[in-house]
Image: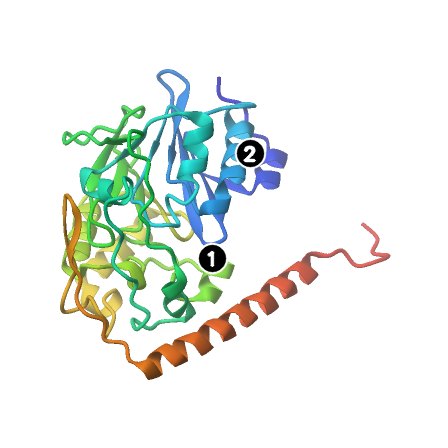
Amino acid sequence: MLHEIDARTKHDSKYFEVADGVWGMKDIFVNFYMVSNPDDNTWALIDTGIKTSASKIKKMASEIFGKGARPSCIILTHAHFDHAGSLQTLIEEWNVPVYAHHLELPYLTGKSSYPPPDPTVGGGIMPLMSVVFPLGPINIRGRASVLSEDGTVPGLPEWKFFHTPGHAPGHVSLYRKNDGVLIAGDAFITTNQQSALSILFQTKKLMGPPKYFTYDWKLAKQSIKELMDLEPQTVATGHGKPMTGSQMRKDLHDLYNNFNKKAVPGGGRYVKNPAVADATGFIFIPPATINKRAIALTALSITAAAAAMLVLLNKKKKNRRPLMGTQL
């Protein structure tokens, strides 16, 4: 049975409610979601965060669904390191099936890595730091199952999935028609993922997929069109806070109508020459355009970014400390 959520538990665990039966949590810079199935009081986990997210996921599950709760299954929007980072840890303990689009299986069964990120897309520090992000693959051969071509979502009969490639070949987004809730993954996001400050303060802004990991901008635009046409009421994405209402839908239309200006980087490795993938993984990756000078600047920027983040985090912690002698 689902447990009642009180304000104290919600505050302590730092998860948030997206809609009826849908909860999310941010770990560092990425979100994962839990969705209940009211038909049989089971639930599914959507994405698994980064490598260190497993303990937070288990704590959140226990607080919402009861001590020792485990999902009926895990569903991946895609298998980038920040969405499948805790997958192996969780399935070893939970022994539950994992579902992904068939074009995402090469990155889950040890067959193919993702293309290198593009640190030249600009827009902030995160693209420069992306050169150290893991590209996979992981290997859960025998545990990974393919989502059905009819769009049904295992364990969640009220939901449908849509294939939304461009950011990852087998990227999917999940939609519940009865109340218009869309879990979009990274097909589009609701904060500026290029900016460390936007990530830290979760500044709301509807944007295209993270630029440094998007391998095909034409497909990414088509995916946004498919999701825009659903006219969702609530959107929950892989990065950023949920957004709702008419202004969100207006922003989504504006993003699509001005996609080249608002989403596509002014230059970069995959802008004019997308990488190409099939069921075996990536079969073509365009050559890098970065030079030695850019590499040196990237290294310096990463060092500066790390220092800046430490300063900001320490400042944030100090602001949270109660003043000595303060009367409450």
- Depth order, front residue of 305/286: 286
- Residue 208 lies, in percent from the top left, at 28, 59
| Visual colour scheme | rainbow
Q: Neighbour class for label 2 at 10 Å: few (<14), some, many (≥20)?
A: some
Residue for point 19% across, 55% down: 220
Q: Nearer the viewer, residue 121 or 109?
A: 109
Residue farthest toward the bottom in the current orientation of the protein: 293
Residue corresponding to mark 1: 202
Residue 324 lies left or right of residue 126; in this view the side is right
Residue 231 seen in the current view: no
- Residue 301 is situated, as x and y percent measured from the top left of the image, at 45, 76
Could you tell me if residue 32 is visible in this image? Answer: yes
Tell me if residue 53 comes above or below residue 195 in the rendering.
above
Residue 93 percent across, percent down from the top left: 47, 28
Image point (29%, 41%), residue name = 108
- Say few, some or many: other residues with alpha carbon within 10 Å of mark 1 (under 14 / 14 to 19 / 20 or more): some
Residue 1 in the figure: left or right of residue 113 = right
State the residue in front, 204 or 247: 204
Q: As displayed, is residue 70 above or below residue 116?
A: above
| Residues tagged 1 and 2 counted as in contact (Cβ below 8 A) | no
Q: Amino acid at mark 1?
A: Gln
Q: Earlier in the sequence, mark 1 or mark 2?
A: 2
Which residue carries the number 2 mark? Answer: 59
Element type at mark 1: loop
* Snapshot quadrant of residue 124: bottom left
Distance (Cα) linking label 1 and label 2: 22 Å
Residue 122 higher or lower than 5, as above or below: below
**Residue at the spot x=31%, y=23% of the render?**
155
Q: Residue at x 33, y 35 (%)?
A: 140
Tell me where residue 245 appears, x and y as whole percent.
Answer: 34, 47
In the orientation shown, which residue stands out farthest toward the right?
A: 325
- Label 2 sits on what residue type? Lys
